[in-house]
């Protein structure tokens, strides 16, 4: 293994990814509390490492970047390293106004308005839709007892509404061009299914995951019927790819998803991430659904960002007392992600409290 780029005080734990698998499969007694996060921002990673990781060129210095990225998670005592890589679209993800009708990540960035646009788009190769090299690099760098939790960056709903059709475009197309909607999601289904088949076949990948924000504070963005027709069949293919390789599947999705939790459970999703106290506290989700799907994380980002040390320790302890124990399965972490504006010391405080309480 190469020398670590992290020079600070690392959290020492006996790494054992098999125990993370046990909580996802809800098997045996949970006597160890794994840590889990969906993503960490460049700013948070940089603060923890002590240098700006975003100044490392991810194309020209790919090995250096992914080594530093792995060091970040290992320095926090993780058994799993989350990695998501976008599909290999041609000009969509980085398009500019000269080439398309607007900028990326906005309604103006939509680039499909009709079947002609659909046909002209530089779609990824269905047989090679995702770059596997970052997973291979990190895999060579990981110590024993650690695995990657890997997936595609941006889910099918997000790609369709942020980069391809836009929310308004999708809404109009649902009424005026249903065949276009079918074509877009049919194409995405093939791409995501193949990407997950490739990822799930890799020994360094211990579990598959997908982030796809489907809702907001009170409901899903689109009606459940739409999700059941266009989105959940894609999830089903991804779950099948993971399970076909004896690996679990995790979904990260923000918002109030109460109307579709039974659908997600039926699909076979093993773990659910993203919780907010003002929507559904993680312990409440666990009480209702925890026997059939494992909650991951759940510590409200707002509290972690703003709390005093005592408030943070009390809050972490309260969640652990509710979610960790006999007959319960759970991984410890935030309800959303490690943001640029989250104080690193606050996060280290809740991790320290978790280790003190559980003794692991």
Image (spheres, rainbow, N blue to C red):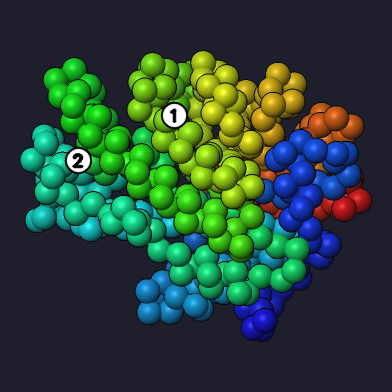
Q: Is residue 315 above or below residue 21?
A: above
Label 2: state its secondary structure.
loop
Q: Position of residue 198 (x, y in %)?
A: 47, 56
Residue beneath the point at 50% across and 27% down:
255
- Quadrant position of the N terminus in the picture: bottom right
Q: Position of residue 160 (x, y in %)?
A: 29, 38
- The numbered mark, 2 or 1, whose residue comes first in the sequence reads 2
Q: Residues within 10 Å of mark 1 (few under 14, many from 20)?
A: many
35 with respect to 271 (left or right)? right
State the image quarter where residue 305 is shown. top right
Q: Is residue 301 visible?
A: no
State the image quarter where residue 348 is shown. bottom right
Nearest to the observer: residue 290 or residue 218: 290
Mark nearest the camera among 2 and 1 is 1
Pointer 2: what residue?
A: 110
Q: Is residue 219 visible?
A: yes
Q: Position of residue 214 (x, y in %)?
A: 44, 30
Q: Residues within 10 Å of mark 2 (few under 14, many from 20)?
A: many
Label 1: state its secondary structure.
helix
Residue beneath the point at 21% across and 57% down:
91
Q: Position of residue 247 (x, y in %)?
A: 63, 48
Residue beneath the point at 28% across and 41% down:
187
Residue beneath the point at 40% across and 63% down:
131
Nearest to the observer: residue 253 or residue 179: 179
Q: Which mark is residue 232?
A: 1
In three-dimensional space, the C-alpha distance between marks 2 and 1, rounded to whole angstroms, equals: 23 Å
Q: Which mark is residue 217?
A: none
182 with respect to 282 (left or right)? left
Nearest to the observer: residue 326 or residue 246: 246
Q: Is residue 8 above or below residue 335?
A: below
């Amino acid at each position: 293994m190469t020398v670590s780029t992290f020079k600070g005080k690392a959290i020492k734990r006996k790494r054992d990814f098999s125990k993370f698998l046990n909580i996802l499969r809800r098997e045996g007694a949970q006597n160890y509390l794994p840590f889990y996060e969906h993503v960490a921002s460049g700013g948070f990673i940089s603060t923890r490492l002590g240098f700006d990781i975003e100044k490392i060129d991810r194309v020209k210095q790919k090995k250096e970047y992914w080594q530093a990225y792995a060091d970040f998670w290992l320095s926090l005592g993780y058994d799993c390293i989350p990695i998501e890589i976008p599909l290999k679209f041609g000009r969509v993800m980085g398009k500019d106004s000269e080439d398309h009708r607007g900028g990326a990540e906005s309604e103006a960035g939509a680039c499909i308005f009709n079947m002609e646009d659909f046909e002209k788009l530089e779609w990824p190769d269905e047989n090679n839709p995702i770059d596997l090299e970052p997973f291979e690099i990190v895999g060579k760098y990981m110590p024993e007892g650690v695995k990657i939790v890997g997936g595609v960056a941006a889910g099918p709903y997000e790609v369709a509404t942020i980069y391809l059709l836009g929310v308004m475009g999708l809404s109009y197309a649902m009424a005026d061009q249903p065949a276009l909607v079918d074509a877009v999601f049919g194409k995405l289904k093939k791409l995501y299914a193949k990407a997950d088949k490739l990822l799930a076949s890799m020994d360094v990948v211990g579990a598959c995951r997908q982030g796809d924000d489907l809702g907001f504070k009170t409901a899903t963005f689109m009606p459940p019927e739409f999700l059941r027709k266009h989105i959940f069949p894609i999830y089903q293919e991804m779950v099948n790819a993971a399970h076909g390789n004896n690996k679990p599947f995790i979904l990260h999705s923000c918002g109030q998803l109460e109307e579709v939790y039974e659908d997600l459970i039926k699909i076979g999703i093993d773990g659910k991430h993203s919780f907010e106290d003002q929507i559904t506290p993680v312990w409440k989700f666990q009480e209702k659904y925890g026997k059939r799907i494992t909650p991951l994380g759940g510590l409200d980002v707002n509290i972690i960002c703003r709390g005093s040390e005592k408030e943070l320790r009390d809050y972490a302890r309260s969640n652990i007392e509710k979610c960790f124990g006999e007959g319960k399965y759970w991984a410890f972490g935030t309800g959303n992600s490690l943001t640029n504006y989250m104080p690193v010391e606050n996060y280290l405080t809740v991790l320290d409290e978790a280790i003190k309480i559980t003794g692991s």
